Amino acid sequence: MRASVAVLAAAGLMAFACGSQPPPSAPSTSPTSPAPASQGNLTGTWSGSGSDSFSAEQVTWVLTQSDSTITGRAALSPVDPADGSCASCHKLRNGTVNGTFDGSTLTIRMNFPAGGDVPTPICTTDLSGTATVIANRVTGTYSGADSCEGFYGNGQLTLTRQP
């Protein structure tokens, strides 16, 4: 009898403790805070700098992400457009960027077609590479070629998400 009273008392306490107490609340997160890119979506404008065996440049991407697919516009511009170098002409390009994003690693291809209002309208540029995305910062490497100037090697870029 004593054992069954103890069991009933324990069961009653457990029911009271489990049923009448509100569950502990999870730490709150602000629903208006954008998720860091390494956990979510790369959609938006990214800008920064790059440098390769040819010269340094400014880089801008305007990206859209659907699932793991990245598409968008890419622009290169010379650091000093008035320096008179080949880089000041060949780094003034507008084109596309596409690739895939797995949550931390971005694989990209930037293509800048011939034509347009650029100093070298007959030249094409095709660059590809990989980048790591941490929070709102992209750091990566690329290589490729320009149809007029040749190989672009040892490329590095660092971009940040713009507000």
Image (cartoon, helix red, strand yellow):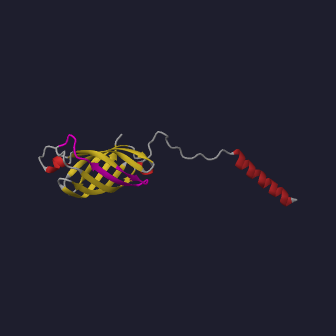
In the rendered image of this protein, does residue 128 appear above or below residue 28?
A: below
Magenta includes 107? yes
Quarter holding residue 4? bottom right
Q: Residue at x 71, y 45 (%)?
A: 20
Q: Position of residue 22 (x, y in %)?
A: 66, 44
In-front residue for pair 138/31: 138
Q: Residue 94 at what x, y percent from top left? A: 26, 44
- On whether residue 38 falls in the magenta region, the answer is no
User: Residue furthest toward the left?
Assistant: 84
Which residue is at a point 30% across and 50% down the rendered structure image?
Answer: 110
Q: Nearer the viewer, residue 30 or 119?
A: 119
* 8 on left or right of 56: right
What is the residue that sits farthest to the right in this orientation?
1
Horizontal and vertical percent position of residue 1: 88, 59
- First to last magenta residue range: 98-118
Quadrant housing the C terminus: top left
Asked which quadrant contains residue 93, the reply is top left
Instruction: Give me the residue at 74% from left, 52% from top.
Output: 14
In this figure, what is the number of numbered marks? 0
Picture quadrant where residue 2 is located = bottom right
Left or right: residue 2 versus residue 55 is: right
Q: Nearer the viewer, residue 81 or 148?
A: 148
* Vertical relation: 145 (above or below) 35: below
For residue 85, side relative to residue 93 (left or right): left
Can you give x and y, in whole percent of width and height, for residue 66 in the image?
44, 46
